[in-house]
Structures are given as structure tokens and as C-alpha cells.
Amino acid sequence: MAVKQVSVFVENKCGRAYSIIETLGENGINISALSIAETEDYGVMRLIVDDHKKAIDVLSETGVIVKCTDVLAVPIEDKPGGLAKMLDIIQRGGLSVIYMYAFTQKNNDDALLVVKTKDIAKTAQVLEENGVKPIEPNEIFG
């Protein structure tokens, strides 16, 4: 049910994003989704990768702070209102979204929403009760 997300905490300096992405590529790690949230001095890069353990190992060796977090990947209709429907289900379940970002998959008409709430298990339950099955990690990379 939960997907492992790699979060990287980095200084907001020229070339930092490049060096992280380059390190992952040089180590054969495929990125499916990416989000960067920044402040003036620091940023958080959130990634869904095909090998989160290896990503954590190789990035830790470069001296950056890396954390693994459980999130949900949820299919949403890739059309106007699709995201609103998903958020309505979550809020009617009494849950608040901490953060989210979206991505698409090859050979799939739906977009995927990566969502983080305080209670991933309850969020998955609420979604399934409303006919939405979160994506399993192996479904993202096939």
C-alpha cells in the first residue's frame, strides 16, 4: 500500500539539484516522481525512485541528509476536476493533506497523486471505501 519516498535536504545553491540527480543516474536509480520545495537557504527534494534503499545509501555518502517516508500513490482522473474529487474523499474522511504532488505513468490514462497525511493507513482505508485503490510500489515501475 505505502510507497517509499526519499526526501533529500539540501542547501539552496547552484548545482545542488544537479549533483543529486546526477548521483542517482550514475548509480542506475530511476526516478518516477520528483518535487522540490524550497526556502531561501534550504530545500527538500522528494523523490519516488525504483530502489529507495540504494538511493539512500548513495546519497548519504555524498553528505546530504536523506530520509525515507511512507506516502500513498493514488490514481486520479487526468481531467478537470479529477484532483478535486480525490481531495474531497480525503477531507470527507476527516484527514488533512500535509503535502502532495502529481506525476504521470507511461501507458496509463490516469495521473498519479503522491499524498502525505498524518495517517497513511487510515487514508488508504478511506480511499478504498470510496472505490479508489492506492497504487502498489511495484505498479509504479512495473
Image: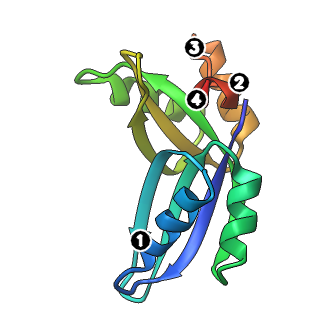
Q: Position of residue 32 (x, y in %)?
A: 50, 41
Cα distance in 3D space between marks 4 and 2: 20 Å
Q: Is residue 62 above or below residue 52?
A: below
The crowd level at tag 4 (other Cα within 10 Å; few <14, some 14-19, many 20+) is some
Q: Position of residue 19 (x, y in %)?
A: 47, 74
Residue at the spot x=36%, y=19% of the render?
77
Label at residue 18: 1
Callout 3 amino acid = Asn
Query: Which residue is label 3 attached to?
Result: 130
What residue sits right under mark 2 in the picture? Answer: 125
Alpha carbon distance from label 2 to label 3: 9 Å
Which residue is at a point 22% across and 24% down the rendered structure image? 80
Q: Give the alpha-carbon distance from disc 4 to disc 3, as whole Å.
A: 22 Å
**Nearer to us: label 3 or label 1:** 1
SS category of the residue bearing label 1: helix
Compute the Cα span from label 4 to label 1.
Answer: 24 Å
Could you tell me how many numbered marks the image carries?
4
Choose mark 4 or mark 2, whichever is in front: 4
Check disc 2 and give the amino acid type.
Answer: Gln
| Tag 1–tag 2 contact (CB < 8 Å) | no
Residue 3, located in which quarter of the rendered image? top right
Amino acid type, residue under disc 4 in the picture: Ile
Q: Quadrant of residue 55?
A: bottom right
> Foreground: 19 or 125?
19
Tell which tag, 1 or 2, sits nearer the viewer: 1
| Among numbered discs 4 and 2, the one appearing first in the sequence | 2
* Quadrant occupied by the C terminus: top right
Q: CA distance from mark 3 to mark 1?
A: 40 Å
Q: Which residue is mark 4?
A: 140
